[in-house]
Image (tube, helix red, strand yellow):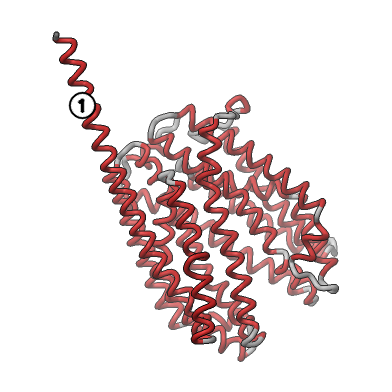
Amino acid sequence: MNTKRIELLSKEPVTKAILTMSIPVVMGMMIQVLYNLVDTFFIGILGDPNQLAAVNITTPIFMLMMAIAGIVGTGASSYISRCLGEKDYEKANKTLSTGIAICIGLGIIVMIVGSIYITSIAKSLGASEATFPFVLAYSMILFLGAIPIMCNFAIGQLLRSEGAAMGAMMGMLIGTVGNIILDPIFIFGFDMGIQGAAIATVLGNAMGLVYYIYYIASGKTFVKFKIKSISLDQQIWNQIFVIGTPATISQILMGAAMVLCNNLAVQYGDVVVAGMGVAAKIMTIGTFVFMGFAAGCQPIVGYNYGAKNFPRMKEVIIKGMLMTSGIGIVLTILFGIFARNLISIFTPLNDVVLQGTTILSALIWSLPFLGAQMIANTTVQSMGKAGASLFLSITRQGVFYIPLLLTLNHLFEFKGLIYAQPVSDIMTLTLSITVLTIIIKNSITQMNRDTVLNMENQSSILSTDTI
């Protein structure tokens, strides 16, 4: 067995371990940001606003697929890391195999249900008479490709759970580059328009999935996939769904918050909505960097929690938070200085640039706090604390942001609208650190109690043997 990854999780200096695990994920995330921009660019070349609108309208379908796949990606990854820390390799193998099987099953369900109710779904997304045919065509192809889209996303997370960060990044890179190459071929070469973009998306994900299948089948992974290891073990299923579901709920709430924010922004004019869209795209640079660090810390935290190596686990958490907060401060300064220049890259319209600059200058105050918040939430998931994970997942959007969005917009109008997110993130970070601190203290206390109990039991046994 290749023990280098286990040594990375258990013995490598913490700063080096975090960077080794996180940088490949961050690179992959940046590639994903590039894909989002390039995909929009190619559709925009068509000069058809209806097709461009249709791509945006169908975004919630892709987000929903990622959210459902995240049940397996988050839940199984957390449990695999903890199993490795406990040196229960058989259960880790069963969790990987079972997680992949569950993801395939979920993909089949999404494909069937989506295909049956495709017309109703297209209408519910807000498709107009002009955009409806394009939304329908794009959505149908996405639903037919549900299995490769969802499995590609989930398996990448599963590989990271054992420390295979480079393998996960390569699959993401292959899928994204494949998508970028195939976009112009299908959109323009085969004159398929928006349908070509959808096909390129599915095939790009399929290419990434093929790489992951090769990577696992070639024995490069520590945790092995075997058909006979697919299990009905209730504990495995519970861990996958109980830990994975909060992450899905969080993503669904995020989508709902985005819809609400856009609806509130409409009252200030279409220029504000356009500026908010551009500012949000720029903000994803910081968000994805933090997601990469959180994903990189997750297996290290999970492994050491399972191994009951709490000092190392706490060091990972603290250094991860300091790194992301430092990056957040740097990005806040850079985005603040070059806000207008950044907005201008995406639009030549002066009104949109002006509004986008104002909005970006407000949103950037989330950046110093967002990374540490993600580290805290991921840590709770890694420790298998389902109730706390669900609570924190609901808190950011449902408890803080959505109510603040409505309240501050009512009280301060436009200023309240754009500053609701930073205020929400500061409050969420404070709560997340408080919850995490309590959980860690309780875990250490429980470990000490177990140690004392074991010593007493051993002492009792020795006394009995002596008698």
Instruction: Name the residue at 47% across, 81% down.
Output: 362
Q: Position of residue 403 (x, y in %)?
A: 51, 72
The residue at the point 43 percent across, 69 percent down is 425
* Residue drawn at x 57%, y 47% as measured from the top left: 71
Image quadrant assignment for residue 128:
bottom right
Name the one closer to the observer, 217 or 48.
48
Residue at the image position 47 percent from the left and 82 percent from the top: 361
Q: Is residue 128 above or below residue 321?
A: below
Q: Position of residue 76 (x, y in %)?
A: 52, 41
Q: Would residue 340 be seen by someone viewing this image from the given angle?
A: no
Q: Quadrant of residue 96?
A: top right
Q: Where residue 458 sits: x, y (%)? A: 21, 21
* Element at label 1: helix
* Vertical relation: 261 (above or below) 250: below
Q: Which residue is mark 1?
A: 455
Residue type at numbered disc 1: Met
Q: Position of residue 208 (x, y in %)?
A: 64, 48
> Does residue 311 appear to the left or right of 152 in the view shown?
left
Whether residue 212 is visible: yes
Quadrant in the picture for the C terminus: top left
Along the line of sight, the residue nearer the viewer: 21 or 96: 96
Q: Is residue 134 above or below residue 439?
A: below
